[in-house]
Image: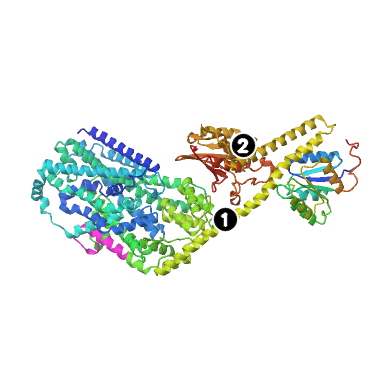
């Protein structure tokens, strides 16, 4: 059985590791991309079911990536969860304006992250119970 | 008087001169210049006009041709008293145009043409070589007098060896003290002081011998007059032609001899010194000539027949058993010879290196953008030129056999130098004088001088056969060297003088009127002729394409890094800009060109700047300003210009302030966002992993790994808070400084060691000069080390060269120390240079850099607290930071209260 795939665009290696651990355990297949400039290419290549996008990235900001994603007919339907560490109201507005499906401020509760992703990528849990045979 | 004593005394005297020069040079470098700037030192240095030729030769000349010797004193006296305003104009032009030599003056006046520089240089070298040989001869002859048992016999066993030693010693002295500074306008204080001292020695020596002759050998003034009456000198008949001619050529020579120009114009530190010199120098000449006739008369009475009258000053006291007086006289002659040779060698080497070597190098290399140390090249070429000039003098001495054929060389050199006179006087008084005219006059005059005077003087053994002298070349009688155009019976000197200067002047006048001056020439013509009329005006540059940074890196290679940076900083400050890079305005470019001209000459400086500017030349406004004679229009436009300059300055200041405010406001917003980001990022990891760790069934290795991450991120958070608090305290100047004393070298070591944990896997090399680092600093040493660590860690982190090298240069500047950290990476782009010291201004915007971007902001605040500064130093190739720190932090200055 195939896991639902999510692409995580995040440059902080420790945060990426934490998210990878949380989502993998919940049954997601997680790919991590640390660079903003490579993000679009990775999305095209892997066609993930959802994207988690950090706002401040080296090379290219999350908002720019989001705008390009929404402008691309083939990719525009991909749900995107925006993460930001700046936590200002303005960031949330900007993310919504650029077309983010959901928004989460750092630091977050692990359960909130999972809930936001699953709400965004469809009501049903990704693939079977979280404590499936693969654990 | 044993010969060995003489050698010992001379050596001691020479050592003494070295010492004096050394001390003067040191005083000058420490800024204690008071007596060096005195008009008396200036006046005394002018006395290099009196060489050994006048010291010994005047008596000889009086013995042979009566009062004719007076002409060499009369000419300069007339110039200094009657033509004082010409001197003043020359000195003023020399200072405003930063002229390095007479060749440079001519080249600069006629459109910064290097061709003219080369012509004048060649003429000067040709005319001075025999003159230098004459000085060497006089010193060896005077040694010979002491070496022999009888005064008549002055053959030293190894005379040429003595001359060689003297030439070598002079070359050493000149190189040591004549090429310390590159900028000829920076003046050679050591040399000038030594020369002034020698001027006193020669005056005292000659006057002492004179007094001894009048009151010792003769019986006072009355008796002396009677003896003069009885001597052959009384029968001397004035030859008006020779007398007038020699007076004229001496007057010309005092303006045009390269060495006279050097002391008169280039070494002049203050125009007002001319006021003193205008009477004191003639007075000096008067004293020098006062006893010439008595010494000659008594010498003729007492000397053995056939004795050389040129050496009466020495042989007279010696034969009367006054050994010490003779020794003094010897030192006087020695001083006359050496001071002339030293100054002549400096003047000639400056000309050769600025007009021949450097332009050749510039033409051969591809352009100033290429790396290379011009300063080193120019200094080396100057040193080699000095050695070459003295070698040529020595060679000529050997060639001419040290014979008495040298006796008339003094006037020959004078006439050679006088060929520059028409171009010089025309250039500073007549705006119509052109490059073509000057070149033609110089070449014709020089050629006639060579043909009619110089080559025949080398003697029969030399370059012209007796046949040619008598019959002319190819049997053409009208071309006989000493009877041109069939005019015979003239004295050869007067013959050459009249023909060379007459045709020189004619060619100069006629061709100047027929030819048309180029734009640069016009500007320079106005700047020279109207030098006293307010703004010296000629700005050759319209706004060019040059980047200030390129100009800085070029200027550094010529002036040296320190001086170029100071100059750029001062110019930038004048424009209201902080830092090292002024806007390349025409005024700035003109100032820079003059500054460079002081080092490498006008023509070369002009060429180097045009290479960077891309051939920009003269603007239409400048030409109109030249053409417009009406004073009102000039004044009006000057006022307008002053107003618009003022407006432009204000606008620039406002623009800068506005940019600064806008960027500050953006930064303030960004600051809050940044703080939030920097705090939340580690918090995110900590929260996420601690939630994970709260779950029960985690494998032990994973648990340990995640706990380690939490620990690491917690420390990162602490570091950030520490930095923020540190910065806040520093910014409010509430920091408690812990002042102690430490060796700077040890502090740098400490910092280098502490920073070695940054990217330790990477090859990283230091380039340091340990001896310069040893000095005590009284400051907060921990804070200072913190700054060093920051700079070194930054270099380790960001320097993108394959083999990273960090150069640390320490220089002491009076009571401050300057420490430069220069790496070999790509450096920081100009747009960012103003921002790097701001908070969170991390250029790479990546968390991989490890810090929060507060490092340089903290460094700046620390340095301000320590009473010093830290700045970015552009134009060094890589990223470069300069720290300036007071060696002793003043206790009564506890930081500015917040």
Region of the chain picked out in magenta, as a range: B484-507
- The numbered disc on residue B763 is 2
Q: Which residue is mark 1?
A: B656
Q: Chain of mark 2?
A: B
State the scheme by which the image is colored: rainbow
- Say above or below: B211 vs B546: above
Between marks 1 and 2 in the image, the one whose residue lies nearer the viewer? 1
Residue B187 in view, yes or no: yes
Q: Quadrant of residue B160?
A: top left
The percent coordinates of residue B722 (x first, y second) are: 65, 37
Q: Chain under label 1? A: B
Quarter of the image that includes the N terminus of chain B:
top left
Whether B492 is among the magenta residues is yes
**Is residue B253 positioned above or below B626 on the image?**
above
Dividing the picture into quarters, in which one does residue B7 lie?
top left
Q: Main secondary structure of the magenta part?
A: helix
Q: Position of residue B504 (x, y in %)?
A: 30, 62
Q: Residue at x 88, y 48 (%)?
A: A122
Give the camera-side residue of B559 and B357.
Answer: B559
Q: Residue at x 57, y 32 (%)?
A: B750
């Amino acid at each position: 059985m195939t896991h639902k795939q999510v692409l995580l665009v995040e440059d902080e290696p420790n945060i990426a590791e934490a998210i990878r651990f949380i989502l993998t355990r919940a049954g997601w297949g997680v790919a991590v991309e640390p660079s903003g400039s490579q993000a679009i290419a990775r999305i095209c290549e892997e066609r993930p079911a959802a994207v988690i996008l950090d706002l401040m990235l080296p090379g290219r900001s999350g908002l720019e990536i989001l705008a390009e994603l929404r402008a691309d007919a083939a990719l525009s339907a991909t749900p995107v969860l925006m993460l930001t560490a700046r936590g200002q109201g303005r960031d949330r507005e900007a993310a919504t304006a650029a077309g983010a499906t959901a928004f989460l401020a750092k630091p977050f509760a692990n359960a909130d992250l999972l809930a936001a992703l699953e709400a965004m990528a469809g009501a049903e849990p990704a693939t079977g119970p979280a404590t499936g045979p693969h654990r | 008087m044993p010969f060995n004593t003489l050698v010992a005394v001379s050596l001691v005297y020479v050592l003494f001169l070295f010492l004096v020069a050394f001390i003067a040079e040191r005083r000058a470098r420490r800024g204690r210049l008071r007596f060096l700037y005195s008009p008396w030192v200036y006046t005394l240095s002018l006395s290099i006009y009196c060489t050994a030729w006048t010291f010994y030769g005047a008596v000889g000349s009086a013995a042979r041709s009566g009062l004719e010797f007076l002409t060499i004193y009369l000419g300069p006296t007339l110039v200094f008293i009657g033509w004082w305003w010409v001197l003043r104009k020359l000195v003023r032009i020399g200072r405003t145009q930063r002229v390095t030599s007479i060749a440079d003056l001519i080249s600069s006046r006629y459109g910064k043409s290097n061709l003219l520089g080369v012509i004048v240089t060649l003429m000067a070298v040709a005319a001075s070589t025999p003159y230098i040989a004459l000085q060497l001869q006089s010193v060896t002859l005077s040694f010979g007098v002491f070496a022999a048992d009888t005064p008549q016999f002055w053959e030293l066993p190894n005379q040429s060896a003595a001359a060689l030693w003297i030439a070598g010693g002079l070359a050493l002295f000149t190189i040591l003290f004549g090429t310390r500074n590159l900028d000829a306008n920076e003046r050679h204080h050591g040399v000038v002081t030594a020369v002034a001292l020698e001027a006193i020695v020669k005056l005292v020596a000659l006057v002492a011998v004179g007094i001894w002759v009048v009151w010792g050998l003769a019986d006072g003034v009355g008796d002396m007059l009677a003896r003069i009456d009885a001597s052959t000198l009384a029968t001397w008949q004035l030859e008006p032609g020779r007398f007038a001619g020699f007076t004229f050529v001496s007057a010309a020579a005092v303006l045009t001899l390269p060495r006279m120009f050097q002391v008169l114009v280039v070494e002049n530190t203050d125009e007002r010194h001319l006021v003193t010199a205008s009477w004191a120098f003639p007075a000096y000449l008067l004293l020098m000539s006062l006893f010439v006739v008595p010494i000659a008369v008594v010498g003729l009475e007492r000397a053995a027949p056939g004795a050389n009258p040129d050496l009466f000053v020495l042989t007279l006291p010696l034969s009367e058993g006054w050994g010490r007086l003779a020794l003094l006289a010897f030192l006087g002659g020695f001083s006359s010879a050496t001071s002339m040779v030293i100054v002549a060698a400096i003047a000639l080497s400056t000309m050769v290196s600025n007009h021949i070597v450097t332009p050749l190098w510039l033409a051969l290399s591809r352009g100033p953008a290429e790396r290379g140390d011009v300063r080193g090249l120019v200094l080396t070429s100057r040193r080699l030129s000095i050695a070459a000039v003295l070698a040529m003098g020595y060679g000529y001495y050997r060639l001419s056999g040290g014979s008495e054929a040298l006796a008339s060389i003094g006037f020959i050199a004078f006439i050679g130098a006088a060929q520059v006179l028409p171009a010089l006087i025309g250039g500073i008084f007549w705006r119509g004088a052109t490059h073509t005219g000057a070149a033609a006059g110089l070449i014709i005059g020089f050629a006639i001088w060579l043909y009619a005077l110089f080559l025949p003087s080398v003697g029969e053994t030399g370059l012209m056969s007796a046949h040619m002298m008598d019959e002319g070349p190819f049997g053409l009688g009208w071309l006989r060297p000493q009877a041109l155009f069939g005019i015979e019976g003239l004295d050869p000197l007067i013959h050459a003088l009249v023909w060379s200067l007459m045709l020189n002047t004619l060619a100069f006048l006629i061709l100047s009127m027929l030819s048309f001056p180029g734009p640069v020439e016009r500007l320079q013509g106005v700047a020279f002729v109207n030098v006293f009329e307010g703004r010296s005006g000629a700005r050759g540059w319209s706004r060019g394409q040059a980047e200030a940074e390129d100009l800085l890196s070029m200027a550094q290679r010529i002036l040296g890094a320190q001086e170029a940076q100071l100059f750029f900083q001062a110019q930038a400050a004048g424009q209201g800009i902080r830092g090292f890079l002024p806007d390349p305005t025409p005024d700035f470019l003109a100032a820079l060109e003059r500054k460079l001209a002081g080092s490498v000459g006008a023509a070369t400086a002009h060429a180097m700047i045009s290479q960077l500017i891309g051939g920009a030349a003269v603007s239409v406004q400048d030409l109109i300003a030249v053409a417009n004679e009406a004073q009102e229009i000039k004044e009006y436009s000057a006022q307008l210009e002053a107003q618009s300059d003022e407006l432009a300055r204000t606008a620039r200041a406002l623009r800068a302030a506005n940019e600064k405010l806008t960027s500050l406001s953006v930064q303030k917003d960004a600051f809050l966002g940044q703080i939030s980001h920097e705090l939340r990022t580690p918090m995110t990891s900590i929260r996420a992993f601690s939630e994970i760790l709260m779950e029960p069934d985690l494998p032990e290795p994973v648990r340990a790994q995640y706990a380690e991450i939490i620990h690491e991120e917690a420390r990162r958070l602490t570091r950030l808070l520490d930095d923020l608090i540190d910065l806040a305290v520093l910014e409010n100047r509430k920091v408690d400084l812990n002042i102690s004393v430490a060796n700077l070298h040890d502090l740098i070591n400490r910092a280098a060691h502490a920073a070695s944990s940054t990217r330790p896997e990477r090859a990283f090399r230091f380039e340091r000069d340990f001896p310069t680092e040893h000095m005590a600093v009284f400051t907060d040493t921990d804070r200072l080390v913190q700054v060093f660590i920051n700079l070194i860690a930054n270099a380790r982190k960001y320097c993108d060269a394959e083999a990273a090298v960090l150069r640390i240069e320490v220089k002491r500047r009076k009571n401050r120390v300057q420490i430069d950290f220069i790496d070999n990476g790509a450096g920081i782009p100009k747009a960012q240079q103003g921002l790097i010291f701001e908070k969170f201004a991390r250029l790479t915007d990546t968390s991989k850099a490890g810090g929060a971007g507060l490092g340089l902001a903290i460094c700046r605040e620390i340095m301000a607290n320590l009473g010093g500064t830290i700045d970015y130093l552009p134009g060094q190739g890589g990223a470069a930071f300069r720290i300036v720190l007071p060696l002793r932090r003043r206790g009564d200055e506890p930081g500015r209260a917040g």
